[in-house]
Image (tube, rainbow, N blue to C red):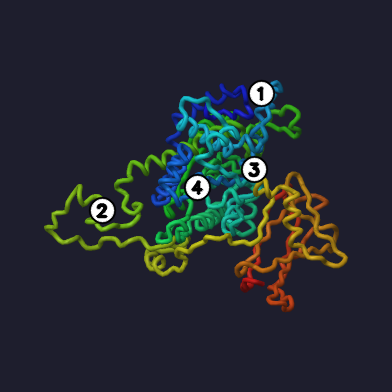
Amino acid sequence: QASQLSTNDVKFKFFDFTAELLQLISIKLPHSTGFLPRDWNIVRGILEKAERRLLYLKDPQQYSTVYPREPADPVKIVVLGGSILVGRNCRKLLRDMGKNLNMRLPNKECTHSFRLQVFLDQMTSLLLHPDKPLLVGEPLRRELGNLFLVSKIAMGGTNTAVGNQIFKYDLIPEEAQGADIVLNAYATNDMHVLTMQDFQAEQKTLREGVFDMIQDFVRTIMQPNSCQDKNHPEFQVDRRPLLLHLDDYVGNEQREILQTMELSQSVGTLAQYYGFATISYANIVREWVYGDTHESWFSPEGWWAIQPDMRRAATKTTTMQREIHPGMGFHIATSWIVAYNLLHIATTYCSMEQYLDSGGNDLVDYEKSWASNLIPLTKELAQAPGRPHSVPSGLPPRLNSTLLLDDISERWLNQTDGSVCRDTRRCPFSWVSGLSLQQNDKTWILDYFAARTMKVPNQKPWELVDEGGKIGFMAQGVGNRWALEFLNLPRPIQTVSIFYLRSYGDKWQDSRASISLSAKTNGEQWMPLGESLELLGSHSKNTSEMYSKELDFLPVLAGG
């Protein structure tokens, strides 16, 4: 019942389907657990935050007495992904089951991230009010509030490389700022044939490209971020989120079974090295999918069917078709799998809590540890030589073919990318199409850009357009110039990132744009910042994809 989308499936017509999925999935949930997080300090911080929030939901007055200076924010979970997380093909089961369902179920409310929020809300309600009927959606939030807040960042045609840019430059929406848990759900898009073509252009194999792309993302998310606690200035707070990687890929961008597992092998290597947690939907369903590739509860229905018109029934085929978007069964199951792994991490921590000195990562002196009282040392002999030293601060050196046992210790000790405090947003201006509901609001977008648009003689600003659900700006003819001005910069700026769409067809053929940057300080003349960036609007693929480019230059001083 906690999985019912009460505001959509009011009469729970998918009760039987949900029950059958639960019967299959529940006994295999342990197979979804992969690597556990190495830094239990982060887990402890999340559990303490959840404990405070739970007390606030139970008794706000008691909370203000116990924690007079602590905010009562929910635990923030941010899920990143591509078109699967957008919900493509998720609601197709409604059409397959017949038109008499009369159910409103938008793609965004069919996805596993939305279902995870519903499930966690329902479980919170059961915890606080076990004798009351279950509520969901707005009624639950009004009466109870959220213990967890799940935010989705999902855009079709994106992969972990785009996710890295989003976090690297703090482009995440306001409601998702300060994430406690980050779930990378890009796995299928990372194995997409279009991603493969990008790697080939860089002269990389699929394995090399995936490995490098995910490592960049991991290093961005896991970079130490210690800041002074605003409520307790005498303490430093590590603001890194708990990183989880979800492997949801079972095919079929690659037909060779070994190739389909290259992503999970790369993620496993990186998880062992950096110490982040992994979750695998694929490990649960793989034998069912391989045993019957015509099933469609857990794998894409379109593998053995052609359906150019969604209003008409699919045509069965004997030749396997390209399709990466699974149906509703995947999304229901994945919401349980993620919830199970969050519980698994929490209970593992709780079972070890009394033994975790300083989070369990520091090599605490024996006499200062939990073990000294339980097993006192006899001290008949001196301590054996060669005891390991404390782990160096910061992330370990980048993992690649040049990293050797000979010098890894020295390189780790001497690297300069230690802990920094990032307590403000890095970008004073940002907008990424599709990133959130607000950033898809055309009125908000136009107002946001109008405040920064300069008047150019005989020129009009670029037009805001919606191309197949992808909102962006397009030039109004050849040579159309658009100038944006950013005044009184709050901090030095030395990088500008451009997200742009490349597509196909006559409208896009041979299109290109030129981006140039200039700066001035204290009324001086505009000075160019390096060379212009030339962007191509078309490519040799029958799809529309988001790309990103960066312009780096000498810092423009704050106030310019």
> Where residue 439 sits: x, y (%)?
68, 50
Q: CA distance from mark 3 to mark 4?
A: 21 Å
Image coordinates of residue 143 in percent, x first then y, are 55, 34
Type of the residue with mark 2: Ser
Circle 4 or circle 1, nearest the eye? 4
Identify the mark nearer the N-term, 2 or 1.
Answer: 1
Within-10-Å neighbours for mark 1: few <14, some 14–19, many 20+: few
* Residue receiving disc 4: 181
Q: Earlier in the sequence, mark 3 or mark 4?
A: 3
The residue identified by callout 2 is 369
The residue under label 1 is: 97
> What mark, if any, has residue 83 been given in the picture?
3
In the image: residue 287, left or right of residue 162:
left
State how far apart marks 3 and 1 are (Cα): 23 Å
Label 2: which secondary element? loop
Return the disc, 4 or 1, that comes first in the chain's sequence. 1
